[in-house]
Image: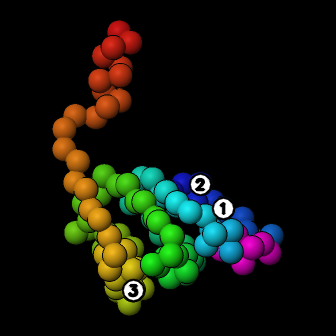
Amino acid sequence: MTHFLEKIAQTILDGTYIKMLNQIEKTHLLILDDFGLHPMDKITRLALLQILEDRYGKKSTLISSQLPVDKWHLYIGENTIADAIMDRLSGNAHRFDLKGDSLRKKREQKID
């Protein structure tokens, strides 16, 4: 998500925003990792909504997050846009709740 947020800001500034949206639309699998770690501003919310709208029913999007799904609406903010984003995310989704210890912890223990 950090890279995604930076990329949106950069493309708006350099005039390649539409090109970026078109590129993302064609990508077979979009992975947004660490969703919910960084605040979303209005531009990011609108970009995410556009991306999800363009991909809905056509391409796959995978979102990983440590933030519980029931907190996503509040995280996204701005109720109308959050409703639209959540509708596109949940309308045709498969959800997997993972439990257990962090794999990073297990890897660190093996190194020691």
**Which is nearer the N-term, disc 1 or disc 3?**
1
Q: Position of residue 22 (x, y in %)?
A: 68, 74
Residue at point 31% right, 31% down? 103
Q: Nearer the viewer, mark 3 or mark 2?
A: 3
Residue at point 42% right, 52% down? 34
Of all residues, the one furthest to the top in this rendering is 112
Q: Nearer the viewer, mark 1 or mark 3?
A: 3
Q: Which residue is mark 2?
A: 3
Q: Which residue is mark 3?
A: 84
In the drawing, what numbered circle is on residue 32? none
The boundaries of the magenta stretch are 15-21
Asked whether the beta carbons under mark 1 and mark 2 sit within 8 Å of each other, the answer is yes
SS under mark 2: helix
Q: Position of residue 111 (x, y in %)?
A: 38, 12
In the drawing, what numbered circle is on residue 7? 1
Q: Nearer the viewer, residue 53 or 9?
A: 53
Tell me where residue 28 sits by quadrant.
Answer: bottom right
Tell me where residue 94 sits by quadrant.
Answer: bottom left
Could you tell me the amino acid type at mark 1?
Lys
Q: Position of residue 24 (x, y in %)?
A: 62, 68
Tell me where residue 77 sits by quadrant.
Answer: bottom left
- The 10 Å Cα crowd at callout 3, few under 14, some 14 to 19, many 20 or more, is some
Of all residues, the one furthest to the left in this rendering is 99
- The 10 Å Cα crowd at callout 1, few under 14, some 14 to 19, many 20 or more, is some
Residue at point 40% right, 59% down? 63
Quadrant holding the C terminus: top left
Could you tell me the amino acid type at mark 2?
His
Compared to residue 53, the image places residue 9 above or below, namely above
Compared to residue 85, the image places residue 111 above or below, namely above
